[in-house]
Image (cartoon, grey):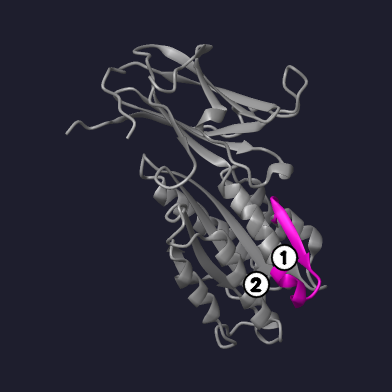
């Protein structure tokens, strides 16, 4: 059995040529960003990238015919290169964290049943069933926090939607013994758990990963274990592989802080009767985020030296592109995209 040895793996964030604003023809352009580029003998090139079609196209996705691959400004035949572009099962895993505030103000109020119902609806919207074609391409973990130093795991990362739902339904008023709220610490630890998971799953060279976290709270940080500036800087420091959303309930939240934590989306529920819609609105944004990542694999005809790839995307009257370089030293024939 011939082993395919990775030549190099380079993660490129925010420094790649990214299409935004207007293209050279003055038309609105598609925002594209390269997340990771790898090459693998005998001649495979793999690109993991993000495409933003704008809020007006929240649930639109591109197919292979919407892309063009150029090497050194020459169009590459998708048939001859065995090019494959996909954003679902097999090449890509999207990991989500649902982080729930279960401090005393939630557990000891009439809001708890509505919080649980809204969380269940969120899971049902984001996570595919076993009969869905996307099953296996998305996973989720549920954590909760109160005033204690560490967040608590309710359900580890799983693709099993029913297991996630059952864990939410199992929440009762006895789950916590600390009525305080360690919100800032929970944000930092939740993101750390998500980053650790992506680091773990990305050990598979055939699997690209991205993720999102939703934080729900009905108050502000009371424990004082971690500063809000530390939590904010942690969120700001995340790469575009990550999306962070927040939902605030009631009048005791710090809306400005939650908007900073939820850099990709924030929803305010004035009362618990608004919670379900708030969770569903964020669920739509998480689904859109998960569908914005793509994997391109193709067999390069180059056999030596440095070369430039340009990937172009076309959608309606819009276009976008990014470029990156690769080294074909050691490339030979026999490349197959499975």
Element on which disc 2 rests: helix
Residue 210 horizontal/vertical position (percent): 52, 47
Task: Give the total number of marks visible in the rendering.
Answer: 2
Residue 213 horizontal/vertical position (percent): 59, 58
Q: Residue at x 68, y 87 (%)?
A: 108
**Magenta span has 269?**
yes
Residue 178 - label? none
Q: Residue at x 50, y 11 (%)?
A: 72
Q: Is residue 194 left or right of residue 285?
A: left
Q: Hey, which quadrant is residue 223 in on the image?
A: bottom right
Residue 173 vs 154, above or below: the answer is: below
Region of the chain picked out in magenta, as a range: 262-278
State if disc 2 and disc 1 touch (CB < 8 Å). yes
Q: Residue at x 69, y 42 (%)?
A: 57
Q: Which residue is mark 1?
A: 278
Query: In which quadrant of the rendered image does the C terminus lie?
Result: top left
Residue 196 horizontal/vertical position (percent): 46, 54
Q: Nearer the viewer, residue 231 or 20?
A: 20
First of labels 1, 2 by sequence position: 2
Q: Hey, which quadrant is residue 314 in on the image?
A: top right
Q: Is residue 314 left or right of residue 79?
A: right
Q: Nearer the viewer, residue 56 or 175?
A: 56
Residue 207 vs 225, above or below: the answer is: above
- Tell me the crowding category of disc 1: few under 14, some 14 to 19, or many 20 or more residues within 10 angstroms, Cα based: many
Label 1 to label 2: alpha-carbon separation? 8 Å
Farthest residue, direction left: 1
Q: Which residue is mark 2?
A: 118
Q: Is residue 324 left or right of residue 159?
A: right
């Amino acid at each position: 059995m011939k082993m395919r040895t990775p030549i190099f793996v380079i993660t490129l964030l925010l420094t790649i040529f990214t299409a935004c604003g207007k293209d050279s023809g003055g038309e609105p352009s598609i925002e594209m960003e390269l997340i990771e580029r790898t090459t693998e003998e005998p001649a495979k090139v793999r690109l993991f990238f993000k495409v933003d079609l704008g809020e007006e196209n929240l649930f639109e996705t591109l197919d292979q015919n919407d892309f063009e691959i150029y090497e050194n400004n020459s169009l590459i035949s998708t048939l001859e290169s065995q090019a494959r572009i996909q954003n679902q099962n097999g090449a890509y895993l999207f990991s989500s964290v649902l982080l729930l505030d279960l401090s005393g103000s939630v557990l000891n109020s009439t809001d708890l049943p509505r919080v649980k119902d809204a969380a269940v609806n969120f899971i049902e919207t984001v996570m595919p069933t076993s009969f869905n074609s996307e099953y296996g391409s998305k996973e989720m973990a549920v954590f909760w926090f109160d005033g204690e130093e560490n967040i608590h795991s309710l359900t580890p990362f799983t693709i099993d939607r029913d297991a996630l739902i059952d864990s939410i339904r199992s929440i009762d008023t006895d789950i916590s013994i600390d009525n305080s709220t360690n919100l800032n610490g929970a944000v930092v630890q939740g993101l750390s758990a998500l980053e650790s998971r992506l680091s773990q799953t990305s050990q598979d060279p055939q699997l690209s990963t991205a993720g999102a976290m939703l934080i729900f709270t009905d108050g502000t940080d009371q424990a004082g274990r971690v500063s809000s500036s530390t939590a904010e800087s942690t969120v700001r420091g995340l790469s575009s592989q990550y999306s962070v959303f927040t939902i605030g309930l009631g009048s005791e939240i710090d809306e400005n802080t939650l908007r900073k934590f939820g850099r990709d989306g924030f929803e305010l529920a004035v009362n618990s009767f608004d919670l379900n819609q708030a969770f569903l609105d964020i669920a739509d944004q998480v689904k859109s985020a998960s569908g914005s990542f793509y994997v391109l694999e193709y067999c390069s005809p180059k056999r030596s030296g440095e070369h430039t790839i340009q990937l172009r995307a076309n959608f309606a009257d819009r276009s976008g592109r990014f470029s990156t370089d690769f080294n074909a030293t050691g490339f030979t024939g026999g490349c197959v995209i499975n």
